Image: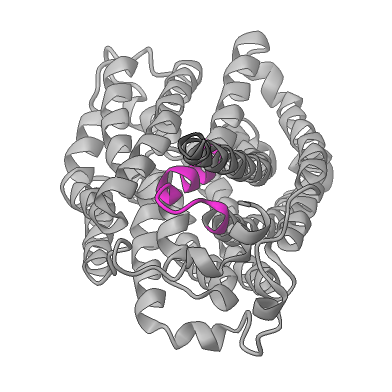
Amino acid sequence: MAENKSAQAPTAGTKGEQKSEWKTIKSILAASSGNLVEWFDFYIYAFFSVYFASQFFVSDSEVVSLMQSAGVFFIGFLMRPIGGYIFGRAADKVGRKNSMLISILLMCAGSLCLAILPTAATAGPVLAPLLLLVVRMIQGLAVGGEYGATATYMSEVATEGKRGFYSSFQYVTLIGGQLLASLLAVIMTHTMGTEQIEAGWWRLPFVIGAVAAVVSLWLRRGLEETTNEETRKNEHSGSFLEVLRHPRAFLVVLGITSVGSLVFYVFTTYMQKYLLLTNEGTPGAETFNKGTIADMMTLCLLVFIFMQPIAGKISDKIGRKNNMLIFVIGMVILPIPMLSLIGSAKSVLVAGILIVVTMAFISMYTSISGIVKAEMFPAHIRGIGVGFTYAIGNAIFGGSAEYVALWFTNVGIGFWFGVYVVVIAIVGLVAVLYMHDNRKHSTIDNAGSSAYQRIGN
């Protein structure tokens, strides 16, 4: 009988572990579903701006109109540090869940406004772009707050030994939002055609985004808070001055975010415009039109999604620092030759393969983007430490990526944009060298986290 009892004990423990794991999965899915909607709403602008840019920015040059549109996209990024500060502080003071709920409400409002925004033909060449700018600022504020709260929440919920894998789903849904925006662009291009989309159907995606945000709000209501009352009531909770008392963590996060955001937006968002501009009028490159490029980028993003959990799992095995080293070394070596090869590619297929190869290296960063930063800050400043610091680097280098690239192209020195990317990658390499190895040092303490006490058990 004693043997039977002892044999049953592991079974009960296994059932408890399975229950705990399932609760963790449900929490990850609930948090990341809202993340997907927010990024879908945000990326709609990037994918559909090629159809409505000239309707808000009146110019004889298509490149200039695209640059002005990209400038508005950049302004949205500049709002991210403000959003990162406000919502990051809120995540530490009133909880991760409340911070995420408010951010999704703001994104919903922004998408609805974009759906009904008047063009220059109606509101005039000054008021129309100004209104567009204001709405994008609201969305930038929301996304700036979303990243830090979601990254922190998912990192705290994830079980020890699987944090890289589970945290990778933040970028699965982030890229998923981008993919859905791209897929919608493909469907509308094939079913309606460019002329109809430019005639006003570009507004439809923003309506869809607003409705999806409402659904996401409902889903997030069921999330359990991961911080305890003691953490939220800490006198230094949510203090940026307290973040500055961790200079190593602050500078490392800033450095890796700068290169990570830059290359992410270059090889996802900007690629559509890059292929159009570099192949315009090139003999034998007639297949490079808006439709075929959108198709190709959709497939690339789909592959990129599946790379995330794989790269995240790798980080659980080899450590976050080694993942990051593979990423930054790749970004020091690849950008110049890859941009040249992609720009001179004679077929969409070849360009797509080159982009996917580059994305494989980028996934070593994106898959662990949230957890690698969350592991550097203690719980009472984790929200603002991750959210605000990330938003600064993301705004400066990620938000400006497309505009800077178009500027280099417009003045006829496109090659030097690749050099610019490599220089930022070298800065990122230095930051990674100063990283702690998460296998030896992590501020996310399994035993002390309320996430495991309330959700994992």
Query: In the rendered view, would you say 149 is above or below 346?
Result: below
Across and down, in percent, residue 324 comes to: 28, 54
Across and down, in percent, residue 97 comes to: 72, 58
Q: In the picture provided, is 397 more to the left or to the right than 74? A: left
Q: Which of 156 and 21 is in front in this view?
A: 21
Q: Which residue is drawn at 43% across and 45% down?
A: 265
Q: Which residue is drawn at 63% across and 55% down?
A: 143
Query: Which image quadrant is residue 350 in?
Result: top left
Q: Nearer the viewer, residue 407 or 385?
A: 385
The question of residue 185 being in magenta is answered with no
Total count of labels = 0
Chief SS of the magenta region: helix
Q: Which residue is drawn at 60% across and 37% down?
A: 49
Query: In the rendered view, would you say 414 is above or below 278?
Result: below
Q: Which colour scheme is used?
A: one colour
The question of residue 167 being in magenta is answered with yes
In the current view of this chain or complex, which residue is farthest to the top?
191
Q: Nearer the viewer, residue 126 or 396?
A: 396
Q: Specify the segment rendered in magenta.
A: 156-175
Q: Specify whether residue 220 is in view.
A: yes
Query: Which image quadrant is residue 146 in?
Result: bottom right
Q: Which of 19 and 294 is in front in this view?
A: 19
Across and down, in percent, residue 387 comes to: 55, 66
Across and down, in percent, residue 141 comes to: 67, 61
Q: In the picture provided, is 438 more to the left or to the right than 45? A: left
Q: Which residue is drawn at 60% across and 84% down?
A: 239
Query: In the rendered view, would you say 427 is above or below 16?
Result: below
Q: Specify whether residue 53 is in view.
A: no
